[in-house]
Amino acid sequence: MTIQSHHKDALHPDIPSLVLHDGTELPRLGQGTWHIGDNPDQRQEEIETLRLGVELGMRVIDTAEMYGEGRSEELVGEAIRGIRDQVFLVSKVYPHNAGLNRIAKSCEASLKRLGTDHLDLYLLHWMGNIPLEETVEGMERLVTEGKIRRWGVSNLDTSEMKKLTSLERGGHCAVNQVLYHLGSRGIEYDLLPWQRANGMPVMAYCPIAQAGSLRSELVHDPSVKAVAERHGITPYQLLLAWCIRHPDVMAIPKTSSPEHVRDNAAAARVQLTEEDLNLLDQAFPAPGHKVPLDIV
């Protein structure tokens, strides 16, 4: 496992990294922004939190044109002003905007809201009715024009990933962003092994089940609490540490307060033992058969 070591004090914990197919090294803990920007009263704190997260090493910021219909991108744009070169910026395009006649306009609108001239990664938000061939061509044109550095997808299951990568230039897909947490382990049966075999990292959204009904069950589970107490951390920190235990999985939890972003960064230092993992496996086992891709 490669470790980034830019920071050594307690407020700047080392964050383990993963490597994209083009050799780009990224921290395995980033920042999600779903619902950020929705409440004007929280705007300044959300901006300060994102900037603090970057300072703490969580320089991947993930957003989407769907989030607040652009409000999240606008807030992120304000947060990264003056530090754009320190940020790995990700946004996502609606499926209905992923065709050749609309993807360039969507990308341009996102760039304007974000106050930048390029995205480091642009994702198809989920599979729609636009043929993948058309989306790939549109993404590749944006790369050629310098509007995006690389592209990927989100919420695609194994069969869809196989179809995508069979296309000409479909293998340029950098990541697949999917829901993944201790209570939702379906990708471990076939999608995660397939991506691992193809050198394609997973970006895990809702890594502490932020948007799911399982969140309360997870954080109050006796096994989760026992392992967390063993490491002197909170159950939320344990869930993050569990999610990024593999060198090809990145977690992008949403954080809207400085306290929580510091807790997230500290979770990156946690090294779970085989005993820890066995206990958690017993409480929340991975499925032994194919299950539908979990989507929020």
Image (cartoon, grey):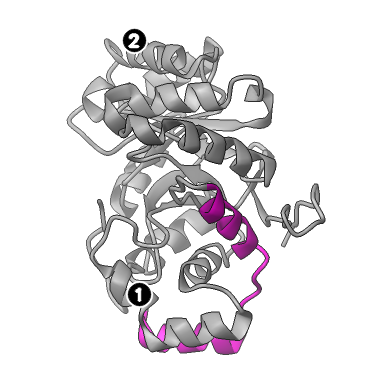
For mark 2, does the 10 Å Cα neighbourhood hold few (<14), some (14 to 19), or many (20 or more) residues? few
User: Is residue 22 visible from the viewing direction of this image?
Assistant: yes
Q: Is 266 contained in the magenta span?
A: yes
Residue, disc 2: 105
For mark 1, does the 10 Å Cα neighbourhood hold few (<14), some (14 to 19), or many (20 or more) residues? many
When the figure is inspected, residue 108 is found, relative to residue 128, above or below; the finding is above
Q: Amino acid at mark 1?
A: Leu
Q: Amino acid at mark 2?
A: Lys
Work out how far the residue at label 2 is from the one at label 1, CA to CA, in angstroms.
Answer: 41 Å
The residue nearer to you, when weighing 153 against 168, is 153
In the structure shown, which secondary structural element does the residue marked by tag 2 occupy? helix
**Quadrant of res 2:** bottom right
Range of magenta residues:
258-285
The residue nearer to you, when weighing 89 against 77, is 77
| Marker count (numbered) | 2
Name the residue: 33% across, 23% down. 70
Q: Residue 179 placed where, x, y %?
A: 35, 55
Counting residues from the N terminus, which is met first, the one under dot 2 or under dot 1? 2
Residue, disc 1: 218
